[in-house]
Image (cartoon, coloured by chain):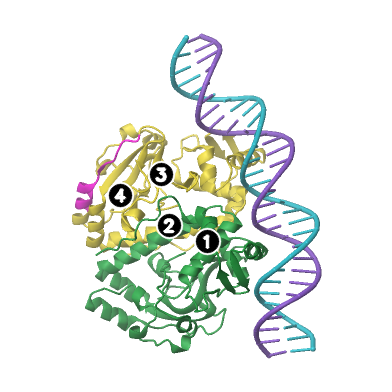
Chain colours: A yellow, B green, C cyan, D purple
Amino acid sequence: MAFDMHHSDLLSAGDVHNPSIVSSQCGQCPVQAQCLASGSSAAVLSRWQQAARPGPDLRDSGNILHTAGDAVHHIYIVRSGCLKIYTVDSDGQERVRDFHLPGDIIGLDAALDGGVHRVTAAAVTPSQVCALPQREVLALLEQSPLLARRVLQRLSHALAEAQSLAGDYTADTRVAAFLLQMQLRLPRPPSGALQLPMTRRDIANYLRLATETVSRVLTRFAAEGLIRSDRQRIHLTDPAALQRLAAPLCAPAATTHEHRLAA
Amino acid sequence: MAFDMHHSDLLSAGDVHNPSIVSSQCGQCPVQAQCLASGSSAAVLSRWQQAARPGPDLRDSGNILHTAGDAVHHIYIVRSGCLKIYTVDSDGQERVRDFHLPGDIIGLDAALDGGVHRVTAAAVTPSQVCALPQREVLALLEQSPLLARRVLQRLSHALAEAQSLAGDYTADTRVAAFLLQMQLRLPRPPSGALQLPMTRRDIANYLRLATETVSRVLTRFAAEGLIRSDRQRIHLTDPAALQRLAAPLCAPAATTHEHRLAA
DNA sequence: CGGTTCCTTGAGAGAACTCAACGTCGGTGG
DNA sequence: CCACCGACGTTGAGTTCTCTCAAGGAACCG
C-alpha cells in the first residue's frame, strides 16, 4: 500500500470518523505524530505548517479529490475518513490501487515523477484532508535532507509492499491479509470490531478478486469461526489463524528487520 | 520493473554481451548516458567517479551478487549481462521480482530503507556491474539535490510499474507485455530477433505463471503468426498485435504523458 | 555417450470467474 | 407510515483459465 503509515492507537474511533471535530490547525492534527515533518528543524517545521491548509471537504462518498491526468498542484495528507486511489483501464474498468487512511499521503509520487496525477482519488467515506502546495513540498525537500530521506524511505517501503502484493495468492490469503492489515490501520472502536469503510466491491477490486469471491471467503471464515461478520462490521475472533492464512503474503522470509531511522 | 531505465540503442549487441571488452573506467562505461550522475556538477561527478569501482565479476549464471538479509555495503549498476532479483518464500519457493539489464540500478531501495537487502541478486548470464559504496551514495544524495531528485523519480516510477504488474491479467497479456518490454530494454542484435537471456522458468516465475503456461502461450503466439520462436531467440513479427494483447497492462488510460525531467 | 537441464505437449484437476437470482438495508416520496 | 427503489451483499450453478502431474524431445556438458 503506497505511503502507508500505520497509525498509532492514539485516537478514539470517534475522533477519526467525525470530521467536524478535526481542527485545521497542525497543533490539533490527529495524525501529527506521523507527520513527515515531525522532528524537523524549527525553520522547516514552521514553513511546513504555514504551507499546510485544509483541503477540499469531501463530505460525501464518491467525492473526487483529483482525477488521473490532472496536473499536481497539491499533495494531500488524510486527516480523517478513507479515500480510494484508482485508475481506469482502457476498457473503462476501475482498478483500485490503494486505500488511504488517516496519516497517509496522497499524490507524493506523482508530484515527484512528472507532475501529473496518474490516478484518481475519491472519498470512500466522508473525509478531511490537509493540502500542501507541490512547490512548497519540493522546495522543502531540497532544503531538508531529513525530509527527503523520509520520503525516500516511504517510497522504497511502498515499492516493497507493492511488489509483495503482486504475487499470485489464493483468495483466502488475500482476504486474510487484508483483514489483518485493516485491523492495524483502522481505528479500533471500543467494541473491538473492525468497521470497514469500503464496500465489498472495492475490497474485491483492490484484491483483484470478484465481489462474490470476497463474499464467499468471508462467509466461510465466519463459518470456520475465524471472524464474526455483520456487513461492514467485522470482528476478528481468531487473528492467529488469519495470520497463518496470510503468511505467504506477509512473510517473504527475511522481512522482519527493524525499521532503522536516519539521524 | 524496479529502477528501469530503458537503455538507448547506442550499443551493439556484442558490446553488451561480451563483458571482456567493457572497461572499468566511467569514460568507457557502456551505460554512461543513463548514469544517475550524468549532468551533475563537476564536483559531484568527480566524487561519483572516484567512488565507482568494478563490482564482483559474475562470470557464471547463478553467481550471487548479494543475498536477502545481507547488510547493504554497495549499490550496483549493471554494465553488461542480466541479473535477476528474487526473494525466497517461507516455503522455499523462489519468487523473481525483477530482471536487471545494463543501466539498471541494484540495491538502491534497500540502501535507502533499512540498510538490509530484502532480495537476492544473481546473474542470469555472465554480467559485469559497477559498485558504489552506500556511504558515498547517501552522502552524495545529501550533497546534490539533482541526484536526490533523480532517485525520487526512479523510485516513484518503479512504484507505478510495480503496481501495474500487480493486476490480474491473462497469461496472454502478461507474456505479450513481457516480450514488448524486453524488446525495448534488450540490446537488439542485427538479426532483429530478440535474444532472451533468461529461461522459461524465470520468465514464468516473474510473470506469476507456470512454466508450461508460458511455453504454451509462446507456442500459440507462434502458431498465430505473432512471433517466430527458436528457444531463447524470438522474433516479434507482429508487434502491433502484441501491443493490443498487452494493452490492459500497459495502458492505464492516461499514462502516456511525457517524462519530464527536473532542471 | 550418458546425464542433466530446459523446453514442449497432453490430460485431468482445481480455483476463481461469470451469470443469475434473491435477501437486506437505507433513502425517498406518496 | 409504508411502499417502492436502488445499491449492496449473499448464495448457487456452470464455465473457463491456469495449474499440476506426467512424459517425451532437444540442447548442453562432462
Quadrant where the C terminus of chain A lies?
Answer: bottom left
Q: Is residue B159 left or right of residue B226?
A: left
User: Looking at the image, which is closer to me, A94 or B62?
Assistant: A94
Discs 1, 3 touching: Cβ within 8 Å: no
Q: In the image shown, does B238 or B12 lie closer to the viewer? A: B238
**What is the secondary structure assignment of the residue under circle 1?**
helix
Mark 1 vs mark 4, CA separation in Å: 28 Å
Residue B256 in the magenta stretch? The answer is no
Where does label 2 land, which residue?
Answer: B160
Residue B249 horizontal/vertical position (percent): 50, 55
CA neighbours of label 2 inside 10 A, class few (<14), some (14 to 19), many (20+): many
In three-dimensional space, the C-alpha distance between marks 2 and 3, rounded to whole angstroms, equals 20 Å
Marks 2 and 4, how far apart at CA: 17 Å
Q: Which residue is mark 4?
A: A71
Residue A128 vertical position relative to residue B76 in the rendered view, above or below: above
Mark 1 or mark 2: name the one nearer the start of the chain. 2
**For mark 3, what is the residue?**
A101
**Label 3 element class:** loop
Residue labelled with disc 1: B177
On whether disc 1 and disc 4 are found on a single subunit, the reply is no
